[in-house]
Amino acid sequence: MSELGLVLTTTDYILLVIAIVLVVWSLINLLTAPSKKIQDKVDTTETEAEKRIEPQETWSDRLNKGLSSSRQNVWGKISGILSQKKLDDEVVEELEEILYTSDLSPALVAELMDKLEESKEEISPKEQIKGFLKDKMLPAQEKVNNALYDFNKTEEKKTQVIMVIGVNGAGKTTTIGKLATKLKNQGAKVVVGACDTFRAAAVEQLEVWCKRADVEIVKAAEGADPSGVAFDAVKKANNEGADYCIIDTAGRLHTKSNLMDELAKTKKVMSKIIPEAPHHTLLVVDAITGQNAMRQAEEFNKSLQLNGLVFTKCDGSSKAGSAVTIVDKLQVPIVYIGVGERVEDLDKFELNSFIDALVG
Ligand SMILES: Nc1nc2c(ncn2[C@@H]2O[C@H](COP(=O)(O)OP(=O)(O)OP(=O)(O)O)[C@@H](O)[C@H]2O)c(=O)[nH]1
Ligand SMILES: [Mg+2]
């Protein structure tokens, strides 16, 4: 210091230190200010994001989303064409081509085309198509037994037996898991019978669902007689005053008569405990199956007298025409519809919402 010719007093030193502290403090402030601004921005954005949280998807949203491919590729497309073009020979041909890919039977395609050709101008093509599909399904849909959905605690306790059948992989076990959950959530006591004794994995799959749903399962070792398991399950449900007993069965081809006979035997055995059992024999149909679904339904109906259908995988590339054809031809209603693998992806089949989601 003395070299610079400066003599600093104690006061000068103190002032110097204060000045240094002030400079450092300003520098720190300068450097942290932008990050504080960013932080403020992030905080605001987060608050906005919180506000933007999507409301829970409703069943109607899921149904609409599930049937979007059928709507875009067939039903909505047809009404779209009709609202833009006159119904001349060329358009008739174009519509027929689309309709034949819809899995609607040829007889129903012809009937719908006649209806569209005769149609009056005051009704929009969309409403005509909706009206046609509803008319075909309504008589059967009116026959649905509400005991399948509504568990009413005040009613006299009687076990309702629901037998679930179908070809391999149609979605039987998954549907039972979802159904058991739904009924249990209403307060019902549910017993599930694991009658698919062909594979140990089938019982394990059902056990997972039953555990999740907190319902009881009656099972036997792999290879056991499925009729015996059904008998035990219905007996337990009946003795314990359960509200529902749901019977899972092994998938089988409708063309294998010995396997169809085995199913008929399982069905019959249950009536030894409750004469009306099974109260509901439900065929699970994979909607993507297309035209072959009609053959399946016919054969299962012949052997087991169906009183309900469950259409699963309607979230896939199904065109849904087979649903209309089967309901119309067999006069068996669709009782549940599945649009995905989660519990909330199964719901009661409701004709108007189905047709609205299908046609748009
Ligand atoms: N996308 C979709 N997948 C489904 C639906 N229902 C069932 N699945 C799936 O289809 C597959 C077969 O389902 P399962 O319930 O095992 O079929 P299953 O009829 O019991 O089959 P088997 O017992 O082998 O005859 C599983 O991967 C399910 O998750 C649905 O509505 N949509
Ligand atoms: Mg199964």
Image (tube, helix red, strand yellow):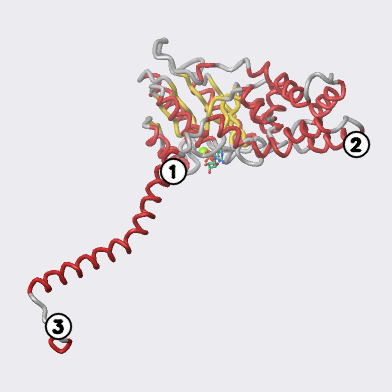
Determine contact: label 1, label 3, CB under 8 Å: no
Q: Quick one: which residue is furthest to the bottom in this view? A: 3
Determine contact: label 1, label 2, CB under 8 Å: no
Disc 2 secondary structure class = helix
The disc, 1 or 3, on the residue closer to the chain's N-terminal end is: 3
Q: Amino acid at mark 2?
A: Glu
Q: Quick one: which residue is furthest to the left in this view? A: 10
Disc 3 secondary structure class = loop
**Mark 1 or mark 3, which is nearer to you?**
3
Label 1 C-beta lies within 8 Å of the nearest ligand 1 atom: no
Disc 1 secondary structure class = helix
Q: Residue at x 82, y 38 (%)?
A: 97
According to the image, label 2 marks what residue? 90
- Foreground residue among 84 and 17: 17
Which quadrant is home to the C terminus? top right
Q: Give me the C-alpha separation between circle 2 and circle 3.
A: 105 Å
Q: Which mark is residue 6?
A: 3
**Mark 1 or mark 2, which is nearer to you?**
1
The disc, 2 or 3, on the residue closer to the chain's N-terminal end is: 3
Q: Amino acid at mark 1?
A: Ala
| Position of 199 relative to 310 (above/below) | below
Q: Position of residue 235 (x, y in %)?
A: 41, 22
Q: Position of residue 124 (x, y in %)?
A: 78, 23
Q: Give me the C-alpha separation between circle 1 and circle 3.
A: 62 Å
According to the image, label 1 marks what residue? 49
